[in-house]
Image (spheres, rainbow, N blue to C red):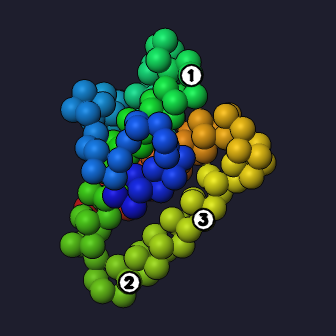
Amino acid sequence: MVTVAAACLFLAGTGSLSAADDPLPEDQIAIQSCLEGVRDYNASSQDDPASRDECIGTVADPCLEEPQGQATAGMVGCYAREIAVWDGLLNSHYAALKDGLETPAFDALRETQRKWIAYRDANCAWPRIFFEGGTIASPIGSSCINQATARRANELADYLDWMQN
């Protein structure tokens, strides 16, 4: 939920997301289906492997095409929906790694995760400074959080795969 809380910094005042919001079931299904498609493709193909990162935007991109996704608050809301899913996956992968790693390895992961969160938060806050609080800052910051959270969730999923194989 740390990612969701950080996203709320960008969503303040929009009413689009609170730290207590859970991902919508249809959003979870969409991203999970995409991730399963990547896994199935990689299991059956001799071509270059697909990346889980290809699933970034599965929820937000179609939402942004809808009329409500055209306004600033709607854009931020679209990203918030997807952030909630990736944040849940990230937390799930982190918990599974915690259960499967020896103490020194998990301690290193925990420290890395703390540093990654600090980096992500600082990096994704930069648009507010650059755009001097203009309306585009919130959607760009929210997109940044979405992409960073998704990529980190996918990195942790890779480690889980390696740990289990």
The three-letter amino acid code for the residue at tag 1 is Ala
Above or below, 49 relative to 95: above
Q: Judge left or right: residue 68 versus residue 129.
A: left
Q: Is residue 121 visible?
A: yes
| Tag 3–tag 1 contact (CB < 8 Å) | no
Q: Which residue is mark 1?
A: 71
Query: Which residue sits furthest front?
Result: 13
In percent of the image, x 57 and y 59: which residue is there? 120
Residue 133 picture quarter: top right
Q: Which quadrant of the figure contains the N terminus?
A: bottom left
Q: Residues within 10 Å of mark 1 (few under 14, many from 20)?
A: some
Q: Which residue is mark 2?
A: 107
Where residue 82 appears, as percent x and y from the top left, is: 40, 37
Sequence order check: which comes first, mark 1 or mark 2? 1
Whole-angstrom CA distance, mark 1 to mark 2, is 43 Å
In percent of the image, x 24 and y 64: which residue is there? 96
Sequence order check: which comes first, mark 3 or mark 1? 1
In percent of the image, x 36 and y 87: which residue is there? 104
Say what secondary structure mark 2 lies in: helix
Give the number of the mark in front: 1 or 2.
Answer: 1
| Tag 3–tag 2 contact (CB < 8 Å) | no
Which of these two is toward me, 71 or 120? 71
Q: Residues within 10 Å of mark 2 (few under 14, many from 20)?
A: few
Q: Which residue is mark 3?
A: 119
Q: Judge left or right: residue 13 versus residue 102.
A: right
In percent of the image, x 54 and y 73: which residue is there? 115
Residue 134's disc is none
Say what secondary structure mark 3 lies in: helix
Where residue 163 appears, as percent x and y from the top left, is: 30, 65
The three-letter amino acid code for the residue at tag 2 is Asp
Residue 108 picture quarter: bottom left
